[in-house]
Amino acid sequence: DQQVKQNSPSLSVQEGRISILNCDYTNSMFDYFLWYKKYPAEGPTFLISISSIKDKNEDGRFTVFLNKSAKHLSLHIVPSQPGDSAVYFCAASAAYNQGGKLIFGQGTELSVKP
Amino acid sequence: GAVVSQHPSRVICKSGTSVKIECRSLDFQATTMFWYRQFPKQSLMLMATSNEGSKATYEQGVEKDKFLINHASLTLSTLTVTSAHPEDSSFYICSAAKGRLDGYTFGSGTRLTVV
């Protein structure tokens, strides 16, 4: 049962344009969502998070949007830079669930071309 | 910011031996730490939740006798892969958070190769 889904395994974007990474979830008890960036053979690096009481959170070039009714969130990166090329994971947690363990999506590999 | 240190970064061991991986929160106390496993080009799969002072909670399908977790203090959790076999070869990552809404920090991961 895949509770967090990233249906696009890869995304290619031109430098300077917007990158939009999508994530869907099925568990309505999730109340905290995070995006991570990951390189091979390294641990994930935290990018940005959003609580279910909000529908938008912005941090520099990164903005996360949450649509609770659709159980959908997205990460916008603008402008995209070649250094953004990596695998991006969305993750979700629920307060009731074992100290808020994170459930990860499958990841989307972003490639930003110069 | 929160820092999580994981050691070793890579280890090669012979089949049948045991390997211990350490995860430390360097500048905060973590009552809960999490252990994940990642196969190539796949997602991070949660293996278990490590609770300070009590038994770990394992995810369905994870053998608790094979993957021993000890959370002896508020800053240290260890994962021991016992009687390792080639199919245990994987990338193991730990994470911790000061609080659930503070963001989860991950260690740098351990590449385990069993030969």
Image (cartoon, coloured by chain):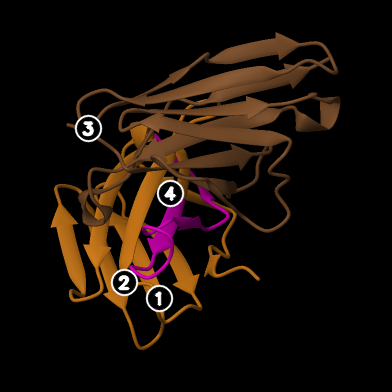
Q: What's the amino acid at mark 2?
A: Asp
Q: Nearer the viewer, mark 1 or mark 3?
A: 3
Q: Which residue is mark 2?
A: A31
User: Any mark on residue A13, and which?
Assistant: 4
A35 is higher (above) or lower (below) than A55? above
Q: What's the amino acid at mark 1?
A: His
Element under disc 3: loop
Camera sees residue A43? yes
B8 is higher (above) or lower (below) than B69? above
Q: Chain of mark 1?
A: A
Q: What's the amino acid at mark 3?
A: Ala
Q: What quarter of the picture does the C terminus of chain A occupy?
A: top left
Q: How far is disc 4 from disc 2 in space, using C-alphas?
A: 30 Å
Q: Nearer the viewer, residue B79 or A13?
A: B79
Name of the residue lying farthest toward the bottom: A69
Q: Which chain is orange?
A: A
Q: Where is residue B59 drawn, in percent x and y? A: 62, 55
Q: Nearer the viewer, mark 4 or mark 3?
A: 3
Q: Nearer the viewer, mark 1 or mark 2?
A: 2
In the image, residue A19 lies in the stretch drawn in magenta: no
Magenta segment boundaries in residue numbering: A89-114
Q: Where is residue A112 drawn, in percent x and y? A: 42, 40
**Residue pictured at 35% horizontal, 88% vertical:** A69
**Residue pictured at 61% horizontal, 39% vertical:** B37
Camera sees residue A44? no
Disc nearer the start of the sequence (4/2): 4
Q: What's the amino acid at mark 4?
A: Val
